[in-house]
Image (spheres, rainbow, N blue to C red):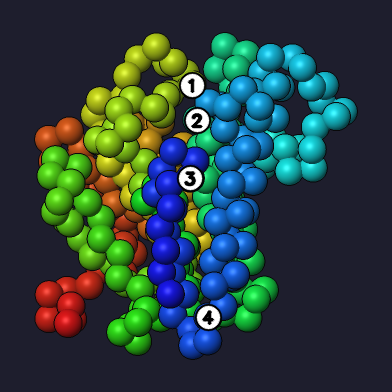
Amino acid sequence: MKQTRLIMGMPVTVEIVDKNVHPDSIEKVFDYFQYVDGKFSTYKNTSEITKINLGEIKKKDWSPDMKKIFKLSAETKKQTNGYFNIEQAGFFDPSGIVKGWAILNAAELLKKMGYKNYYVEAGGDIQVSGKNNKNQYWRIGIRNPFNRYQNVKIVSLKNRGIATSGTYIRGQHVYNPYLPKQSITDVVSLTIIGPNVYEADRYATAAFAMGKNGIAFIGKIKGLEGYMIDNKGQATFTGGFNNYVVHKNENN
């Protein structure tokens, strides 16, 4: 069973391959994404994050999930030498960590329901479990940022997460906290494979903010692999990335 809906301003896809899938299972996952959107969207006047930015909710009154996201953001900022920062000019935007966190939590919902083979995607960031409907590990395409209808690589993933940060779809939405007014132009796409989509997503955001130095940073972190494409179309990748790549003779 597979469904896609527009939530959080992006397509959200849930696919469950196991037998005897109950329709309510997918519905519960979409309900969870709606909850996250209602709480963390900086585009909604009614969201908790908007009210925090307007000074309408004091820190002591933040919800447990909001406190959790701010705690995780502070940890990530420290782990990335300040390159991950949800605050700019006194305004908080945690979307660089919320998406991966939400996808992982949604996938955990399916796991708790007893499913073993599934795929959860929001805006190109993905968590997979088990195998796909062809009884293979999940095949994920990495888009060519200069031609979004073409994949530059296909990777095979089992119980992993993958996330891409880039400017080729949403424009300049990631910033370097040390040079906040300067656009990031030397890198156009950075894809991270991690033990789960939360780790992949937060490090993809931070590494992209580093520009061309980001891929070397990723290469030093155990459990992460990365694939970077610069503004000239040149690819650079970490030492273990090719272990995930599907070669043409395997792609049946």
**Residue 83 shows which numbered tag?**
2
Residue ranking furthest to the right? 60
Compute the Cα span from label 4 to label 2: 41 Å
Q: Secondary structure at mark 1?
A: loop
Q: Earlier in the sequence, mark 4 or mark 2?
A: 4
**Residue 177 shows which numbered tag?**
1
Q: Label 3 near label 1: C-beta < 8 Å?
A: no
Q: Label 2 near label 1: C-beta < 8 Å?
A: yes
**Residue 21 shows which numbered tag?**
4
Q: Is residue 198 visible?
A: no
Q: Earlier in the sequence, mark 3 or mark 4?
A: 3
Q: Position of residue 230 (x, y in %)?
A: 20, 37
Q: Secondary structure at mark 2?
A: loop
Q: Secondary structure at mark 4?
A: loop
Which kind of residue does numbered mark 3 sit on? Answer: Ile
Using a 10 Å C-alpha cutoff, classify the residue at mark 4 as few (fewer than 14 neighbours), some (14 to 19) or many (20 or more).
few
Compute the Cα span from label 1 to label 4: 45 Å
- Give the quadrant of the C terminus: bottom left
> At 62% across and 13% down in the image, what residue appears?
90
Q: Earlier in the sequence, mark 2 or mark 3?
A: 3
Q: Is residue 156 above or below residue 68?
A: below
Q: Earlier in the sequence, mark 1 or mark 4?
A: 4
Q: Which residue is mark 3?
A: 7
> At 87% across and 28% down in the image, what residue appears?
60
Q: Earlier in the sequence, mark 1 or mark 2?
A: 2
Compute the Cα span from label 1 to label 3: 28 Å
Task: Judge by depth and name the residue closer to the eye, 130 or 222.
Answer: 130
Which kind of residue does numbered mark 1 sit on? Answer: Pro
- Given this view, does label 1 or label 3 mark the residue nearer the observer? 3
**In this picture, residue 87 sits left or right of residue 213:** right
